Amino acid sequence: MPISSRGGIELTETGLLGIELLKIENLGISFGKKAALKNLNLTIRRGEVFALIGPSGAGKTTLLRILNFFENPTSGRLIFDGVDCLESPDEIKNCRRRMSMLFQMPAVFNTSVFKNVAYGLSVRKVDKSTIQRKVRDALEIVGLCGKENQNARTLSGGEAQRMAFARAVVYNPDILLLDEPTANLDPANVAKIEDIIKQVNRAGTTIIIATHNIAQVRRIAHRAGILLDGELIEVNTTQAIFTKPKDARTSAFIKNEMVY
């Protein structure tokens, strides 16, 4: 029997019910002689919020960059919606068009908020009326309606991150990758970004978020994976991973983070 739900996905005693969307198989990457990620295996389910938890340097950002094809893995496969994305440059392009990534420090172009948000649509040569509609909808989601003509460089830090969020979701990606999206924000803006994440997820977008913020993971994620020294040591529902961790390293990491 379901015990709780988020984003339209039911959680049961045995885990999350959902359809496989992204499968990571035996993934690894090395920079010189250093292995940054080692033999990762993970399945992401359609419609979930999955949190990658780990300390700085654990490999969280590297994994997100591989998933968005900014880095090429040394080994392994990425199967997205049944397709091996790494089979050819064309497959990489097709898969990447269905994903979007939001970085910890958002890029802010020295132009209007509207043009910042519309950038991805303009590159894809979407017609002007569709751009107008999609940008308006995206700005409404992030609470920036009325700032379309404002220069983006004049926004506050929280507003700039919300604008970047709008730019990331404006073309309705299947997967949204978030790299510490609230790390530099005050509590009020953290709450706003978390509300946006929940809203976008409820609309059907699968979200993978990298963070070391334990409290945030408990608030927004369906499942979590612990990444330490390039290894994915445990994956489970959010409730289970915090209350009944299977690996002693998971327990030690969580206790250490809760101190801070």
Image (spheres, grey):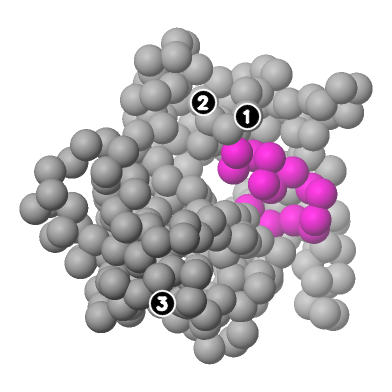
> Which residue type carries mark 2?
Leu
Q: Is residue 68 visible?
A: yes
Residue range highlighted in magenta: 50-65
| Figure quadrant of the C terminus | bottom right
Which residue does the image show at 29% across and 72% down from the upper left? Answer: 149
Q: Position of residue 238 (x, y in %)?
A: 57, 64
Q: Residue at x 79, y 25 (%)?
A: 30
Specify the amino acid type for callout 3.
Asp
**Horizontal arrangement in the rendering, residue 178 relative to residue 126 (left or right):** right
Residue on which the image places disc 2: 78
Q: Which residue is mark 1?
A: 71
Residue 8 image point, x, y percent:
29, 63
Q: Is residue 139 left or right of residue 196?
A: left
Check the image and report above or below for 192 versus 229.
below
If you read the primary sequence from the N terminus, does the residue marked by circle 3 or circle 1 appear first? Answer: 1
Q: Residue 142 placed where, x, y %?
A: 35, 73
134 drawn magenta:
no
